Amino acid sequence: MKPKELLNYYIENFLVDELQKFGFRYSKSVPKFSRTKGEFDLTFSFSLSKWNSEDNCEFWTMWGVTSKEYAKWYKEEWGIKPVNNAIVGDAEWNIPGWTREPFKHFRLTNTDSDKIEFNEFIHNVINIGIPYYSKITDWNIAADYAAAREATVFYDKACDFYLISGQKQKAKDILELKRN
């Protein structure tokens, strides 16, 4: 089976229904899942190895939280559109508690062992990835994630998020951290 077909088979038969319970929509063409809660959109998409072959599908996910409200605020505040409306995001292996290391991706081989492999992936998504990013429910938390929890610190975004939440001193403090 071709790699993308193999992955789509497992996604459609074992993951779509589970994630619909959490309010996620599935886009097969990308493939990705997304959900909106309040001002924040949580998305994770699948990446496939360029070394995949027949009956061999190695994959990982990229996670992100975005907000149209951030883009709107930024345009009003600074007079220009932001480069993007990203809040935070990263590869799955940077999510605390994720069971796989950066170069130990999930692999489907069109064998019975795929069920065990995909069940571990589902466990990570439902019990680790979604809860981690679902904690972003307001701009203070978004700023905390951008400043302290992500693998790459986005001081400018953290500053913006504190400004959105009316916390000017915290915004100034985060910029002072960047200078030091």
Image (spheres, rainbow, N blue to C red):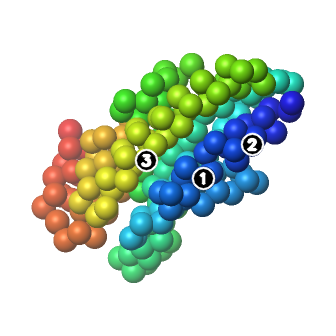
Q: Which mark is residue 3?
A: none
Question: Which is more foreground, mark 2 or mark 1?
Answer: 1
Instruction: Using the numbered discs, state the Cα–Cα distance from disc 2 to disc 3 in whole angstroms.
Output: 20 Å
Mark 2 nearby-residue class (10 Å; few <14, some 14–19, many ≥20): some
Q: Which residue is mark 1?
A: 17
Element carrying mark 2: helix
Q: Quadrant of the C terminus?
A: top left
Q: Amino acid at mark 2?
A: Asn
In the image shown, does 59 or 79 lie closer to the viewer?
59
Q: Which residue is mark 2?
A: 8
Q: Position of residue 152 (x, y in %)?
A: 39, 38
> Which of the 4 quarters of the picture holds residue 156?
bottom left
**Which residue is outermost to the left?**
169
Q: Is residue 164 visible?
A: yes
Classify residue 3 as left or right of residue 139. right
Q: Quadrant of the N terminus?
A: top right
Q: Is residue 51 visible?
A: no
Q: Which residue is mark 3?
A: 130
Q: Amino acid at mark 1?
A: Asp
Precedes in sequence: disc 2 or disc 1: 2
Q: Amino acid at mark 3?
A: Ile
Q: Position of residue 114 (x, y in %)?
A: 68, 25
Q: At x 13% / y 61%, what residue is drawn?
A: 169
In the image shown, does 175 or 8 lie closer to the viewer?
8
